[in-house]
Amino acid sequence: MAVQHLRLTPRNYDGQHVVDWRIDVDRDCRLVQSEDAFGNMLHRFSVDGPLESISTVVEGEVTTFDTAGVASGAVERFPPIVYMRETPLTSPSAGISEFARKTASKESGTLGKLHALLGALHESFTFDADATHAATTAAECFEHRMGVCQDFAHLFIACAREIGAPARYVSGYFLRTDAEDQVAGHAWAEAYVEDLGWVGFDPAHGVSPHENHVRVAVALDYLGAAPIRGARSGGAEETMDVKVRVAQMPVFSQSQSQSQ
Amino acid sequence: MDSRLTQFDELAGADGRIRAPYRKLSRWLAETPPELLASRREQAELLFRRIGITFAVYGAQEATERLIPFDILPRILARSEWATLEKGLIQRVAALNAFLADIYGAGEILKAGVVPADLVYRNPAYCPEMAGRRVPYDIFVHIAGVDIVRTDDQGFFVLEDNARTPSGVSYMLENREVMMRLFPELFALHRVAPIENYPDELLATLRSVAPPHANGDPTIVLMTPGQYNSAFYEHSFLADKLGVELVEGRDLFVRDDVVYMRTTEGPRRVDVIYRRIDDDFLDPLCFRPDSALGVAGLMGAYHAGNVTLANAVGAGAADDKAMYTYMPDIIKFYLGEAPLLQNVPTFRCREDEALAYVLDHLEELVVKEVNGSGGYGMLVGPHASKAQIEEFQAKLKAHPQNFIAQPTLALSTCPIALASGVAPRHVDLRPFVLQGANGARVVPGGLTRVAMTEKSLVVNSSQGGGTKDTWVIDDAWVDEEAMGQA
């Protein structure tokens, strides 16, 4: 038997309009839609075993707009202060604290400080998909100076909170100019700036998110926004294959499939 | 304030005259040869070994399970004293429940500025997944273990509100059972209020909060993290007394938002889970993904209203030591009443002025970690070494918001029977408060914890503390007795 939680459905905000979206699971099950604590769309289903594989295909169309990174008009369930909560994945080490304070001290104003952090992280960290895994913490990534978008997002969140700015994890998709097929979704961060509200920061690319970003779910860290969380009883081994395709219309589709 | 400086003995009283509730016991002690007490102590030890009542100590090198020291002399409260305490406890738990329903609901107390919002929202025990969710009858805390101390014969202080999964009730019940076997003659002398009905009251409480679909005949289970948990003995003991299944996460599963228990006769729907497992481990899909102790999908079933968890998820947001300092205000805010039980005066180290005072007076104070429990991570100033004080100075300066400090209370003492004779030792009391849709109740008694070492103020069992049976005896009877003597 298997239970799956999907956070794979984007919602509207000022930077995007969801034109069309659907989820297909290749098993006989009831897909229950709800909203999670942070206002994300959550789909849940359970499937009775024995199972060889489950394949989940998600397809849709989203119109995006450049809002200079400001994520206004989104579903907000909490005051910003909630996003000051520390989690194991975003807990700051002494090194992170020092890095954050030093980097931010060069600028005045929260927005300036956050952009300084964004630039510094993008510059001094190397993308390496083999260096980390789903449970890598911000502190571990900081030590290795390597990681993937998820790790950089965690690191940015830890730094932002360290300088007093509420920050959160964003999972989503990114339209690349060089390739349509990707091995994973994308992740970045949002930080709260007085007078502006939530502002996005994409440390993997060193920019604020723009019309190439599709925003799907937010949370305190990866765990709360993870596209797929599942559990099963019985069985020996499990593997997950993810294929993502993000393209400009007229061809737009992305799919994630999981097999075990 | 002065009364806190001098030690109050519950037997001898302030003026050295035996206090009314202890008159019979005192006379009996005077007439009883030391050999008899010694042999009863041996019998008690034997009985506890036979029952197998043990608990595990985290971090202990030797045997993982220990026998908690038991003292054979009862701690006695008069019915009138108990009545005050009982009212205060019920008031306290009503306020805890109102507070939790509010912070996960409209947040009125935060808007009113009575409790700082960041203290709630940044509290590790605050559970975002519960925001905007109603729980059955708005009851979050079904079972509370409120730690009580006294410093004189006037009132009671609350030391700690345990609103998560308080343990110790099995010792309360076992202690009474052993005492009845050891001292039938003492029970004949006193009219002791019964506590044996606790499991029935607990069961009634759990039944009262079952989802409506259970039609008044809910299936209840007790969920344990397993045999390696320090309180596993209590879990199995209680399940047995309640007449419900003792389950681990792997015995349960969720299908389409309904919780089932695997049984030899096929899946059986579960309506109420008395869970003795922390929030973090309940559901690997919602909380810690590495938890092998929980049930995948449990939170979905919970949010759908198909199963009731006792205590509710997120109840810990009300009982941390920082929130404790606001309890008098919380009681006034929701109930419009003055608190019947006092708080121990507490310094919030997150406030600059308080921190400065605490740093200057560490030798006199007890410093506690806001999120610590079981007496771990605590500084008892008067008994601390210079190095320990310096260590806490550094900790306080680095993370003041993680600490509170309290004056060292001269906890009351009760007599205990030692090999060398009868001597006073410091005690506290953990009564167990039940809150269901059927009302609130407290069985008359609780777990008295006693510091077995002379002058020690640390009563935690993890730190070598022991326990005593706690008696609530009839006042009318005490008065009669007093008149008979005159």
Image (cartoon, grey):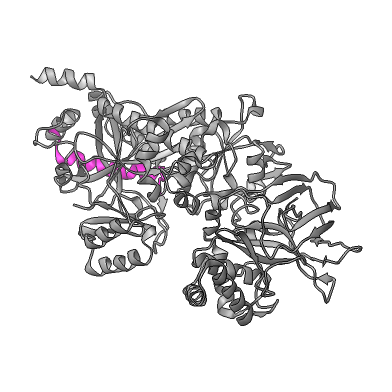
Q: Quadrant of the C terminus of chain B?
A: top left
User: Residue B410 versus residue B178: which sits nearer the camera?
Assistant: B410
A3 with respect to B424 (left or right): right
Residue B94 visible (yes or no): yes
Report the residue at 83% width, 61% height from top: A255
Left or right of A194? Residue B340 is left
Residue B380 left/right relative to A80 = left
Question: Is residue B245 placed above or below B193 in the rendered structure?
Answer: below
Which residue occupies 72% across, 60% down?
A: A215
Q: How many marks?
A: 0
Determine which quarter of the picture holds residue A258: bottom right
In front of the other: A111 or A177: A111
Q: For the magenta stretch, what is the residue range?
A: B31-54
Viewport quadrant of the N terminus of chain B: top left
Residue A186: x and y, percent? 73, 67
> Quadrant of the rendered structure where residue A9 is?
bottom right
Q: Position of residue B187 (x, y in %)?
A: 27, 27
Q: Residue B250: x and y, percent?
A: 63, 49
Image location (x, y in percent) of residue A27:
85, 50
Look at the magenta stretch and give its main secondary structure: helix
